[in-house]
Amino acid sequence: MDAKTGEMSGCPFHGDGATRALFGRTNRDWWPETTQLDILTEEGRSPNPYGEDFDYAEAFNAIDYKALKDDLTALMTDSQDWWPADYGHYGPFFIRMAWHAAGTYRTGDGRGGAGSGQQRFAPLNSWPDNGNLDKARRLLWPIKQKYGKNISWADLFILTGNVAIESMGGPVFGFGGGRADVFEPEMVYWGTEEKWVDEGVETRIDPDEGRALENPLAAIQMGLIYVNPEGPGGNPDPLQSARDIRETFARMAMNDEETVALTAGGHAFGKAHGAQPSDTFGEAPESEALELMGFGWLNDEREIEKGHITTSGIEGAWTNTPTSWSHDYFRLLFKYEYELVKSPAGANQWRPINQAEEDMAPDARDPSQKVPTMMTTADMAMKMDPDYRKISERFHENPEQLDDAFARAWFKLCHRDMGSKIRYLGPEVPQEELIWQDPVPAGSTLSDSDVAKLKQAALESGLSVRELVKAAWASASTYRRSDHRGGANGAHIRFDAIRNWAVNDPDELGCVLDKLDSIRGDASMADMIVIAGSAAVEKAAKDAGFDITVPVTTGRGDAREDQFDAESWEPLEPFADGFRNYLKTKANVKTEDMLIDRAHLLGLSIPEMTVLVGGMRALGAVSEHAKHGSNIGVLTDRPGQLTPDFFTNLLDMGTRWKTVDGSGDEEYVGSDRASGEEKWRATRTDLIFGSNSLLRAQAEVYAEAGSEEKFVTDFIAAWTKVMDADRFDLTYAKYHKAA
């Protein structure tokens, strides 16, 4: 976001700390004494103990789902001495656990979220905002141990949150399983700050100081899920808090109504903890003593028994019925005026003035005692901000609307990163199809002969190999595995909001799509685009001397206009696409790093990324809107043929490379060492395959004599992987039939 205009820049890495652009501070930075296991995952060795062939969807379908939910329901009130439940009910605690597992999701790059159980690992397991959730996960361990591989931690976190809401009478929209665990921290950029929120870190938004929340971040301070409940940087200003809330929730795919519903619904339950100053407690789990076995923060059993617990630093319940679904949140918010006070831990919070005893909450350890309720500065924003207040008043006057809005918003919060509905498993998947799930009608499978005819029609259409390859790539490469959005299925590339992305060369793409539409017959446009691109790759391979078939799966459908939410697709527009040598404008981040990031979102390995770049260059599939011209990086005299010329010429020792003046180290010219004659033009994204030792090792494989056939077969395999990246309709259909 531009601090002056308030508009998004579109760059996924924007702001300070360019050297940490992809990952920010690593776990080794935060906890240098932590045992490092990286050496054991060298050469692609997986840490997954189940093995790469383990089918979690099949395992989940075999679970006794009712028994699991019954066990979770019993757990809610089965209080443990080592961590007794507030009010005798763990429900609010588990709601927070689920919320914080899902709430890291951000639309900017689709990363974060509950999809892989990342809350188990650093840095998330030790974020200040996740204080004492280590206890929630340990409370779940006996159930995870009982059901084993049939329920992932990722699914268990969310299902437990659902059961918690149900057990307290709250509304639930449904549950979809299917999240598979990973067994190591994912590399996610959480920011560049070197301190946590509770160590004096500034808020990331401050218009007066010219600070804006950089993309793709969503949280307002390092170590927070959303916003600081005390207000920006601890400043108890409800209107400034509203500003932060609106920004961060929007970046987590929530509008104002969903934001208010989640706030009110979530705070209908439980309490905040700020019994005494936090410096009296221990370290976070990742830095605590070995004998504590992964526990962190508060571990003094005497203090725990008394309820002397500090997490956020704020102390008290929001409502007088903290273990029952009610509409008391808005009743109390509007019934009383509130005064700013300090919690026992010294945090800013708001206390109702002259609160009646019947509106007070029970003490968390002694239900015979009554204590005042409270509101945070973030809660006061629901009353003080004019737009939030209108929604809050409507929910207050129409509580049934809050019931529905909360259930739907909670479902979205917990499932936003799961992608297409076909990926949802279990008996509680809602029948209703929601627009944020990017629904696509089922397509029809084509016969091999039909595919062959359409391939031939595409080649006879007058469209070039370059044009057909670019169109197919533009459609399929929108996929990102972080939240399983985008991809070729649905043919969203037809819609102006996507077609008009600069990287897609809109005018050219429009002509290609019109031509393909005129020859597709009964095939979907989604299938036709992929078929045509694959036909072009086949021709390019044949022209290079290899008669090989590019496999095509069909059955994709075409999304309708009413199934397409253009606004939610905006974050998918690439600021840079190294595969097409496209760069919107020079960024604070190295251009080659953005190629790595895009390859990661596509789920590509280093060899797959390498061969795709080389192949796309050989095919001339460079964006016309590339910053430095339409042929830059096409290091071959025979563009349109699938050859490894890119690597051969890039590594040619007879070529000397120099920076082009005025290009800002983005464009390079390659000249003949002997004559000085210019031979090629290239970008940083091209030269990295000769400069970086790891990538050069990959490039040398394809530049070696006799590598031509390997190059063609490897390119086709990687190409097909990208074309089929979103084919969950194929891979998941069998699980729904089995269920």
Image (cartoon, grey):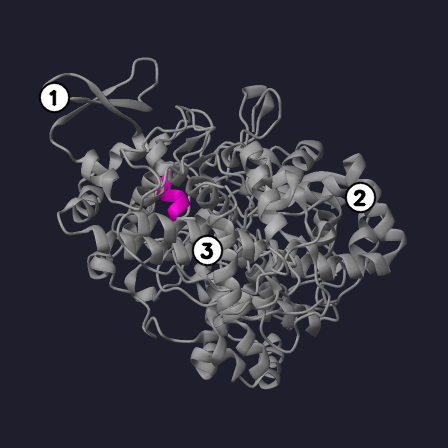
Amino acid type for the residue under numbered disc 2 = Ile
Quadrant where the C terminus is found in the figure: bottom right
Mark 3–mark 2 distance (CA, rounded to whole Å): 61 Å
In the rendered structure, which disc, 1 or 3, sits on the residue that comes first in sequence? 1
Q: Which residue is mark 2?
A: 353
Q: Name the residue rendered at 44%, 45% in the picture.
A: 469
Query: Between marks 2 and 1, how big is the CA–CA gap?
Result: 82 Å
Residue 390: which quarter of the image? top right
The kind of residue on which mark 3 rests is: Met
**What residue is at 79 percent from the left and 37 percent from the top?**
387
On the rendered structure, is 678 left or right of 391? left
For the residue labelled by badge 1, is the local secondary structure a helix, a strand or a loop? loop
- Asked which quadrant contains residue 89, the reply is bottom right
Q: Residue furthest front?
A: 460
| Magenta segment boundaries in residue numbering | 595-599
Asked if 545 appears above or below 463 in the picture, the reply is: below
Distance, label 1 to label 3, CA atoms, is: 40 Å
Mark closer to the observer (3, 2): 3
- Residue 198 coordinates in the image, percent (x, y): 48, 41
Where does residue 692 sit, x and y in percent of width and height?
Answer: 21, 38
- Local crowd at mark 3 within 10 Å, few (<14), some, or many (≥20)? many
The residue that disc 1 covers is 673
